[in-house]
Image (tube, helix red, strand yellow):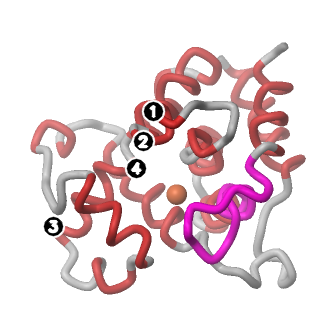
Amino acid sequence: MNALAETAELLSSLRGVWDEEAVDELDHALQSAARAIDDGADDELVLAAALHDIAHSPAFDATAAQRHDETARDWLTPRFGERVGWLAGQHVAAKRYLVATDPGYGAGLSPTSVQSLLAQGGAGVDDELLDHPWWPDAVRLRRYDDAAKDPDARATGRAATIEDVLTIAERVLRRS
Ligand SMILES: [Fe+2]
């Protein structure tokens, strides 16, 4: 199976998967992509936003879901390149960073995100990451992630579609 078919299958498998948020994982993925597009993100960043939580798919086992940032990175990198994998792989680190550095950020986190923060090591800044050229985009992705939990987004046209994500994935593949 090629990377596009695998991506389509993985996205579809997220329908009906709930991580105790207000939307299921497919809606979360499609809203993350839409928020990235709204922000003028490049294709790789949109794709990383759409696929950052794929480890919640039943295609992965429970261990993979637990370290879900690394699972996303390891799945995406060989298919869509270093940057897409890296950006998706930093969404937990970006949350820890925002909690540590943005006083208003923690208040806007969903209850599930607050709860998982503890298991993820709590607030914290990794100095090495701050110097990384892609770090600002990892933080942008985290903002899309947090804004992608709106139960009304599909009805009000504020979500992307699987086809939109696949079109972007195809462009990323063509360029690599
Ligand atoms: Fe997420």
In the rendered image, residue 140, in percent from the top left (x then y), is placed at 43, 59
Q: Is residue 64 above or below residue 164?
A: above
Q: Which residue is mark 4?
A: 91
For the C terminus, the quadrant is: top right
52 drawn magenta: no
Q: Please tell me in which quadrant of the rendered image residue 157 appears.
A: bottom right
Residue at 28 percent across and 49 percent down: it is 93
Q: Amino acid at mark 4?
A: His
CB under 8 Å between callouts 3 and 4? no
Q: Amino acid at mark 3?
A: Ala
Q: Is residue 2 above or below residue 145?
A: above
Q: Amino acid at mark 2?
A: Gln
CB under 8 Å between callouts 2 and 4? no
Q: From the Cβ of disc 4, is ligand 1 less than 8 Å away? A: yes
User: In the drawing, what numbered circle is on residue 63?
Assistant: 1
User: In the drawing, what numbered circle is on residue 66?
Assistant: 2
How packed mark 2 is, by other alpha carbons closer than 10 Å (few <14, some 14-19, many 20 or more), is some
**Chief secondary structure of the magenta span?**
loop
